[in-house]
Image: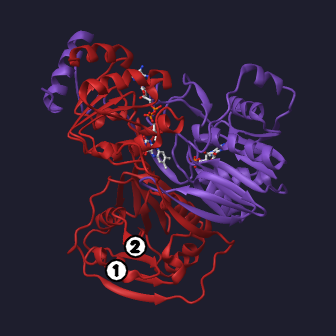
Chain colours: A red, B purple
């Protein structure tokens, strides 16, 4: 097959782990005879490139001072050149804040077909078959895709095993660009780290975590009561933080915190992958949800299919004192 | 400041008992309750606030079946001025490229200072329609805004990144921006509020009149689709028995796994 192109992702001077997952997926697609090419765009690519050694057949390092930070208007012309020359069967990148910003722009600019948030990729007889979640992860969609010269895919975090060094002999090719300007004028200004927090949920041994199923801010004390019995900390899913029922610092998930407590009790959380990614490595996960098909049960060890408002008082009683 | 907001009518799935159609290719949405896509609600609120601060108009655009008019009415009740409906039964679950092509056709000849959309639709989760539209219209874009400020003929966007990190970027107007949940607290919409805007006429376009090229229409990227629903409770050990028994078991597990005395 023709090559698979992976777009490397970096932030704050470090390569992002999701890049290695994309490489794992790419090596899987390429099989024994295919080639994986990685594009790394940065101000100083060399130190970022180290974890890629042995994980890709070819490494294109593209250097320009303005590539210190991701900017689609700088990435697009560089990637367009690489793709036009390479004619890869697929372009892979993480389904991340960068991938969601870049992949559709690339697809739109070059007229390439795109599917996002893939959890499974297969290439057989010149055709891709993919899997991706729909309806918040309650349903998985398998799509047999029509052939195209180049497909673009973004990959769900955690869905693919990261590539291990030794998988390929890496040949590096360097390009230093002199002219590179944003097409419209989008500019990066600054990166902002989260403000100081009231509690660090990542440090808690036990988390009682509430989702939209808690219904409203008036019911938070019910969960707090259970947490008090257990000496646990309260955490939450995104909608709970979005609506201000709990502070943002309590949010578990890709855009919040990754936690790994001994015990994680999920109350009224559906379990979208952005949430799962932040908690699925917890020691023991107990989920209470009245929907037996809620995706949270796919990562929970124990499940209670019940109305949480019936469970909370009874459970509290048994754990009191 | 003239703002366009893309709003999609989506089935509420989190609470629903979903069923797959007989041919296995789609979720049967006949019995589901539809509402405005969660992310789009934040986008409408942001648009109305910008209009309140800077003057101008807010236009709402949806592509969907007849019922999709509900999300337009809701947007008007929140403070929108104008509503455009591309009416179609099939394309709403179709490929973003086709949706965007239809939108671009309808928008030809119009100009906006800002186009807002949601980060993703909660049903299909593509997260690509708005950025595709930006490319189609030749406009700059930024996704996942958790903050947005107009500064003359530019807009400053705080983009959410991973792990409690964000970045500030600036782009020239006109631009396309996708709005992340939590950027604001959307106002409450009452039945009375929706009644008040009933006199505003919705501009209707039939998809079939838009003359989309055959290659752009429908699910042309996919030759076969098959949906899988995990078995109920697949994965976890589901505790069974009466409510009391279930809570007894759960308490025992919590004591053991939580290391409580
Ligand atoms: C870029 C991006 C980043 C994101 N980052 C995050 C993140 O970091 N963290 C995160 O959590 N989400 C994140 N999300 C959002 C995520 O996609 C989901 O929308 C969100 O996790 C859903 O939260 P929820 O489970 O609380 O709500 P819902 O999906 O609405 O689920 C509510 C659940 O409660 C159950 N329920 C309702 N009432 C009861 C009751 N009485 N008893 C028992 N069960 C009940 C329902 O059956 C349902 O399963 C992100 C999304 C995007 C696009
Ligand atoms: N059929 C539609 N009608 C109106 N807006 C849409 C439609 N499809 C997508 N959008 C907009 O594009 C955003 C991203 O959708 P998607 O690419 O489908 O995940 C949504 O949040 C909407 O703002």
Q: Nearer the viewer, residue A202 or B81?
A: A202
Snapshot quadrant of residue B194: top right
Q: Is residue B214 visible?
A: no
Q: Residues within 10 Å of mark 2 (few under 14, many from 20)?
A: some
Q: Quadrant of the C terminus of chain A?
A: top left
Which residue matches tag 1?
A47
Please check whether the numbered discs 2 and 1 fall on a single chain. Answer: yes
**Which residue corresponds to mark 2?**
A13
Residue A192, horizontal then vertical, whole percent? 50, 60
| Ligand 2 picture quarter | top right
Side (left or right) of A41 relative to A285: right
Q: Position of residue B73 (x, y in %)?
A: 75, 30
Residue found at x 15% / y 28%: B260
Residue A196 lies, in percent from the top left, at 43, 51
Q: Secondary structure at mark 2?
A: loop
Q: Is residue B29 above or below residue A4?
A: above
CB contact under 8 Å: marks 2 and 1: yes
For the point 69% across and 33% down, the residue is B71
Up/down of B260 relative to A98, above or below = above
Most foreground residue, B209 or A141: A141
Check mark 2 vs ligand 1: CB closer than 8 Å? yes or no. Answer: no
Seen from the viewer's position, the closer of residues B40 and A243 is: A243
Provide the secondary structure element on which disc 1 rests.
helix
Q: For marks 2 and 1, give the CA distance.
A: 8 Å
Instruction: Identify the disc placed on residue B133.
Output: none
> Is residue B37 left or right of A41 when viewed as pictured?
right
Give the letter of the chain under mark 1: A
């Amino acid at each position: 097959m023709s090559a698979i192109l992976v777009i490397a992702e970096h932030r704050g001077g470090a390569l992002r782990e999701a890049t290695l997952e994309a490489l794992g997926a790419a090596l899987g697609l390429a099989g024994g005879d295919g080639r994986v090419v990685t594009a790394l765009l940065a101000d100083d690519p060399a130190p970022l490139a180290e974890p890629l050694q042995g994980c890709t057949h070819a490494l294109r390092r593209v250097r320009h001072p303005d590539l210190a930070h991701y900017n689609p208007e700088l990435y697009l012309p560089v990637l367009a050149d690489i793709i036009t020359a390479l004619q890869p069967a697929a372009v892979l990148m993480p389904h991340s804040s960068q991938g969601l910003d870049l992949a559709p722009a690339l697809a739109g600019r070059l007229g390439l077909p795109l599917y996002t948030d893939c959890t499974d990729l297969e290439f057989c007889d010149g055709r891709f078959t993919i899997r991706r979640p729909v309806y918040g992860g309650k349903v998985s969609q398998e799509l047999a895709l029509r052939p195209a010269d180049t497909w673009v895919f973004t990959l769900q975090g955690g869905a693919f095993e990261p590539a291990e060094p030794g998988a390929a002999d890496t040949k590096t090719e360097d390009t230093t660009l002199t002219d590179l300007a944003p097409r419209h004028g989008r500019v990066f200004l600054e990166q902002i780290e989260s403000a100081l927090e009231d509690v660090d949920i990542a440090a808690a041994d036990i988390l009682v975590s509430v989702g939209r199923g808690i219904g409203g801010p008036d019911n938070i004390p019910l969960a707090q009561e259970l947490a008090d019995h257990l000496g646990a900390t309260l955490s939450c899913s995104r909608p709970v933080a979005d609506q201000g029922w709990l502070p943002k610092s309590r949010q578990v998930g890709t855009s919040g915190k990754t936690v790994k407590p001994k015990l994680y009790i999920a109350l009224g959380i559906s379990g979208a992958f952005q949430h799962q990614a932040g908690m699925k490595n917890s020691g023991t996960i107990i989920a209470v949800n009245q929907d037996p098909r809620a995706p949270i049960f796919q990562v929970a060890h124990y499940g209670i299919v019940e109305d949480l408002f019936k469970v909370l008082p009874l459970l509290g009683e048994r754990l009191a004192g | 400041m003239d703002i366009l907001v893309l709003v999609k009518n989506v089935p509420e799935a989190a609470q629903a008992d979903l069923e797959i159609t007989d041919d296995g290719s789609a979720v049967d949405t006949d019995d589901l309750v539809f509402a405005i896509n969660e992310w789009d609600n934040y986008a409408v609120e942001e648009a109305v606030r910008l209009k309140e601060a800077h003057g101008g108009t807010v236009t709402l655009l949806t592509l969907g079946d007849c019922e999709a008019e509900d999300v337009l009415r809701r947007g008007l009740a929140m403070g929108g001025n104008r509503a455009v409906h591309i009416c179609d039964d099939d394309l709403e679950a179709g490929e973003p490229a086709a949706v965007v092509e239809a939108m671009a056709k309808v928008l030809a000849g119009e100009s906006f200072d800002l186009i807002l959309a949601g980060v993703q639709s909660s049903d299909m989760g593509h997260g690509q329609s708005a950025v595709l539209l930006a490319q189609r219209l030749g406009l700059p874009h930024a996704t996942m805004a958790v903050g947005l400020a107009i500064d003359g003929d530019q807009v400053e966007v705080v983009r959410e990144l991973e792990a409690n990190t964000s970045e500030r970027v600036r782009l020239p107007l006109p631009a396309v921006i996708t709005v992340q949940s939590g950027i604001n607290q959307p106002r409450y919409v009452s039945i009375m509020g929706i009644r008040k805007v009933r006199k505003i006429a919705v501009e209707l376009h039939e998809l079939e009149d838009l003359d989309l090229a055959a290659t752009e229409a429908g699910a042309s990227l996919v030759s076969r689709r098959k949906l899988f629903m995990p078995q109920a409770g697949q994965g976890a050990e589901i505790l069974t028995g009466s409510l009391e028994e279930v809570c007894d078991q759960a308490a025992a597990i919590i004591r053991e796994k939580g290391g409580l005395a």
